[in-house]
Image (cartoon, rainbow, N blue to C red):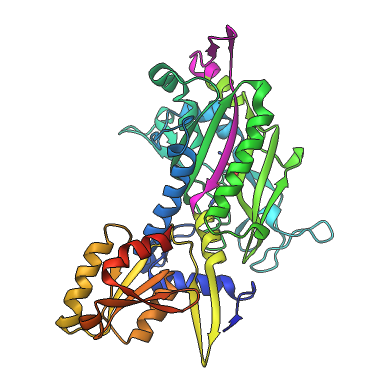
Amino acid sequence: MSETNNKNEGRMEAIVSLCKRRGFIFPGSEIYGGLAGTYDYGPLGVALKKNIQASWYKKFVEDRDDIFPIDAAILMNPKAWEASGHVSGFSDPLVECVKCHNRFRADHIEIIDGVQHCPNDNGILGASRQFNMMFKTQIGATEDPTSITYLRPETAGGMFVNFKNVIDSLHPKLPFGLAQTGKAFRNEIAPRDFVFRMREFEQMEIEYFCHESKWEEVFESLRTDFNSWLISLGLSKELIHEVEIGEKDRAFYSKRTIDFEFDFPIGQKELAGLAYRTDYDLTQHSEFSKTDLSYFDEESKERFIPHCIEPSIGVERAFLAVLSSAYKEEVVGEETRTVLSFVPSIAPIQIAVLPLSKKEELSIPAKEIVKTLKKIARVQYDETQSIGKRYRRQDEIGTPYCVTVDFDTLTDKAVTVRDRDTMLQERVKIVDLDNYLLEKLS
Ligand code: GAP
């Protein structure tokens, strides 16, 4: 078995094509010609996305005692976005071609002899201006300036505005965190690279609050936890790079930021960020809402505004990193097989049950096996086409184990279990099958 097309060349195109062909991701509104910066998840994509989110939720919420979930509304009082600085400062530099009037992100275009040229028709690009990336919308039936609000550009805001609600209802002691996953919207000037830069996407964010004196300790511990979570998704260590962001490139609210960059097929790019947001957000929201968002420490009798460390990742970037890590093409004999070698915990389908023939004498026991295995795993039953084609299809969607029910099963009460990665097959008694697979999947 040898490998092919596992270099970056053509790899992104191969992944995009597999996503469409197998029902992971489709271009948004495709039958109407699409809508730039939007994508729709298909059945397998939904499963993979949910498994990635569940793994984040388990690691950072369920397995800990100090991080609590929040699910805030996407629409918020617009004052919250004034307080956070997004209304005045959430912008990217925009340039427009004097000839074709196409618009581009200024920092994505090379400056040659002091001039930027249009990638479309080589025309001169005009002076750069700031473009606010928030999507404006109207609340209620009257269209006047007081009814304007925004689709949230990050999930973080909903956690800061609920800080007091959590303190008053749960009474958690510092340090503690809030965690939220949900949609975010950004009117990106140039959405690109499949799901890497979108206009509508999802984030998984944590706002971890502590006393100012503890921020470095918290930062380091979240950094370690975040890195080990990325590795648990099957991303190889060597492809993850922690990059210290210099002062001029940091968000205005951050005193320290580390980006977790990843070797995507499109190059080394930001996968996630870890930012020390200081007491900026709670201070701003206190001032703008005229609500006291300080914390009283019973032990030290000190009242203060907590400082905040934020690990933040886009679900789609995690999804793309997982896909591009897992994607392999291997030459097997005369054929090339495509494999998604997902770690079993996040594979959309964990076990496929394949009767060698559609005949009832095999399909009935195979469906019985499906029923039993569904108690321990995500299982798919498939009786279409030849067994070889079915193995290839399951390899391509990343199913770690295939269970084949054949005519010998009727006498030896055993099935063949095929391992996706080694392609080795083992005969296992049906009575032992659930324990055997449970061990393999863990
Ligand atoms: N609350 C902090 C925040 O939103 P960010 O660096 O702007 O910081 C956090 O975004 C993460 O969200 C990024 O690391 C990336 O994974 C994801 N992200 C940001 N913009 C995105 C976009 N246009 N499309 C897809 N994911 C995006």
Question: Looking at the image, is 11 positioned above or below residue 51?
Answer: below
Question: Looking at the image, is 427 positioned above or below residue 432?
Answer: below
Nearer-the-camera pick, 401 or 140: 401
Q: Residue at x 48, y 60 (%)?
A: 36
Q: Position of residue 76 (x, y in %)?
A: 42, 31
Q: Quadrant of residue 305?
A: top right
Nearer-the-camera pick, 319 or 102: 319
Q: Is residue 285 left or right of residue 167?
A: right
Q: Position of residue 32 (x, y in %)?
A: 37, 66
Q: Is residue 394 left or right of residue 330?
A: left
Question: Looking at the image, is 275 positioned above or below residue 390?
Answer: above
Q: Which residues are magenta?
A: 286-315
Question: Looking at the image, is 98 positioned above or below residue 53?
Answer: below
Q: Quadrant of the N terminus?
A: bottom right
Q: Magenta stretch containing residue 421, yes or no?
A: no
Q: Magenta stretch containing residue 308, yes or no?
A: yes
Q: Quadrant of residue 386?
A: bottom left
Q: Is residue 273 visible?
A: yes
Q: Position of residue 14 (x, y in %)?
A: 53, 75
Q: Quadrant of the C terminus?
A: bottom left
Q: Residue at x 70, y 52 (%)?
A: 107
View extreme (bottom): residue:
334
Q: Residue at x 24, y 63 (%)?
A: 372
Q: Quadrant of residue 182?
A: top left
Q: Residue at x 24, y 77 (%)?
A: 413
Q: Position of residue 396 (x, y in %)?
A: 44, 74
Nearer-the-camera pick, 202 or 309: 309
